Image (cartoon, grey):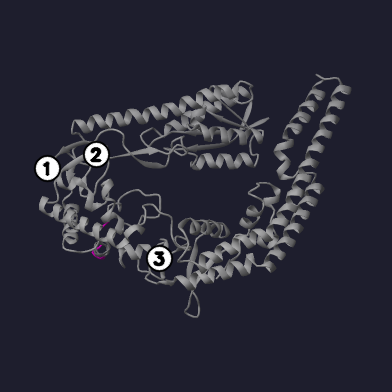
Amino acid sequence: MIRAALYARYSTDKQSEDSIVDQLRVCEQLCAREGFEVVARFSDAAISGGTANRPGYQELLTAARSRVFDVIVAEDSSRLWRELSEQWRALKELLDLNIHVVGHGIDTRRDESKLLLSVTGAAAEAYRDEISRRTRRGLEGRARAARPTGGRAYGYVSSKDSPSGHMEVHATQAETVRAIFQWFADGKSPRWIAGELNRLKVPSPGAAWQRTTRRRDGKWVVSAIHGVASKGTGILNNEKYIGRMTWGRLKWQRGAADSSRRIPARATTELVVHIDERLRIVPQELWERVKRRQLAVARTYAASQGSHRPKAHRPAAHLLSGEIKCPECAGSFSVVSARKYGCTTHHNGGPAACRFDLKLSRHDTEEAVLELLQRELLSPEAVRVFMAGYQAELARARRQSRREGKPAKASTAAIAKYDAAIATLRAQLKAGTLPEEVALDAIAATERRRQAAQQATEAKAERQGAEVVHMLPATAETLSRSLELAVRDRDFLRPDEIAEAKIGLRELLGGTPMRIERLADGRVGLRVRISPQALLIAASGGVDNVVAGACYTMFRSPSESV
């Protein structure tokens, strides 16, 4: 019996949840016709097929890798994918696992399936792009007719939530907007303003949003105040507050590889502007005072920076920026003064945003982290222990594989076709469709080819293992030297040199941020989670096989040190 997994999905929260039930019913009917046994069901509600970041879809792929089923059944290919690159990436992986996809207009068991999938996949992606184009065209038409185009702005009730069906001024938030403008015009800094709003417990613009990321605490941060003047972002730059409604300044487009991401881009259409004094919150005189002060601040800053004025979106200029998490608010630590790391939420939003005001010495913290990594992982002594354990683990894994008669992980996909061919020949022998002598000869020949393929793969793995062992000391020395340079010459390195050192550091930490802890003796420590697997992957050039996957027993679970 062929085991089948069902998958269903619908795109937006405007669609009925019954869609999932209906799709699964269609899939079950298809399984009944084909004689499949349904062993699992997966679904995603209100998520676009243009992204792979779907919980149900990822669970489906995880189960496929564990060979829980033999075929995936969906109503049609667009339920699984609406993005071509992910479609072909996933299909290749599934076919290597000998798992097929079946649905209306799709059946990878047939030779013509690739051609049909190319057509249907391109059509699904084109349909998604066409919907986007039509939506933007409709919004432009509404903007030219001075009608609501959606979206939310602090200080207003959106047309969707307003009883009149038109955008209205939110009285309470409007008072806050006027206070922000008045404070700034009177000489207060955006950082002071954010701290004062948090002290007064004023909810931030995003306090009521259904966020899925970290900032769910409803606190003000400095960027919400000053924004970017050229893009019209931030409270102080929003022209809505003087009744000037502008549409088309920015275009938020879906990410090409992941439609769940929204990427801002400058719009190619002309701006659509209309004035609505009914929506004015800030008096013109106060608006102009704020603009004059912003211009003066910008000129003073430019003069102080001279030719070394930093560029926007520059990479972090310090080794541990973003690598330490605040224990209070889970925000990132970065350099908040000349020689100190501190919580950016506290720094930008004041004590009411985050109470954790501890500052870490930049010099002492970087030195301590470097010393720990060099002692535990990058020193010649640590590398020798690691190499010995790595070789022992490789030998143990191969002995166990031979004892159990299982192929090495790296060779599973390579010899899967031989396993399938042998199974087919045995079935034909049992059914009597092939003469016994012919079938037995063919099975013996296929098994010899299978054994030769497995031996070749294992020999390649042994060669790669030897190369990794040979490269480990040099790799550890390179990483150690890069980190040491970033600490020793921290004030003289170029941004790209710091960025390269940060990549190596992040890999050695396994992408896990360091955590601040209070120690029993009253001191402060960092809990550092070391990931030696990064050293293996760097030494092997990123080869994803049994060589890069086998690790020394003591390093299987990343160790922690304070």
- Kindly report the secondary structure that dominates the magenta region of the rendered protein: loop
Q: Can residue 220 be seen at all in this image of the molecule? A: no
Which range of residues does the magenta coloring cover?
Answer: 199-203
The relative height of residue 342 versus residue 39 in the rendered view (above or below) is: below
In the picture of the structure, the residue carrying the numbered disc 2 is: 160
Q: Which residue is most to the right? A: 437
Q: Which of marks 2 and 1 is in front?
A: 1
Camera-side residue of 496 and 91: 496
- Where, quadrant-wise, is the N terminus in this rendering? top right
Q: Which residue is pictured at 15% across the width and 51% down the height?
A: 171
Mark 3 touches mark 2? (CB < 8 Å): no
In 3D space, how far apart are the residues under numbered discs 3 and 1 (Cα atoms)?
44 Å
Residue 278 is labelled as: 1
Q: Which of marks 3 and 1 is in front?
A: 3
Give, as a three-letter code, the residue at label 3.
Val
Q: In which quarter of the image is residue 414?
A: top right
Label 2: few (<14), some (14–19) or many (≥20) C-alpha neighbours in 10 Å: some
Q: Which residue is pictured at 76% across the width and 29% down the height?
A: 421
The relative height of residue 479 versus residue 209 in the rendered view (above or below) is: below
- Secondary element at image label 3: strand
- Secondary element at image label 1: helix
Camera-side residue of 275 and 429: 275
First in residue order: circle 2 vs circle 1: 2
Residue 335 is labelled as: 3
- Where, quadrant-wise, is the C terminus in this rendering? bottom right
Q: Residue 111 location in percent, x, y?
A: 64, 21
Q: Residue 132 location in percent, x, y?
A: 36, 31
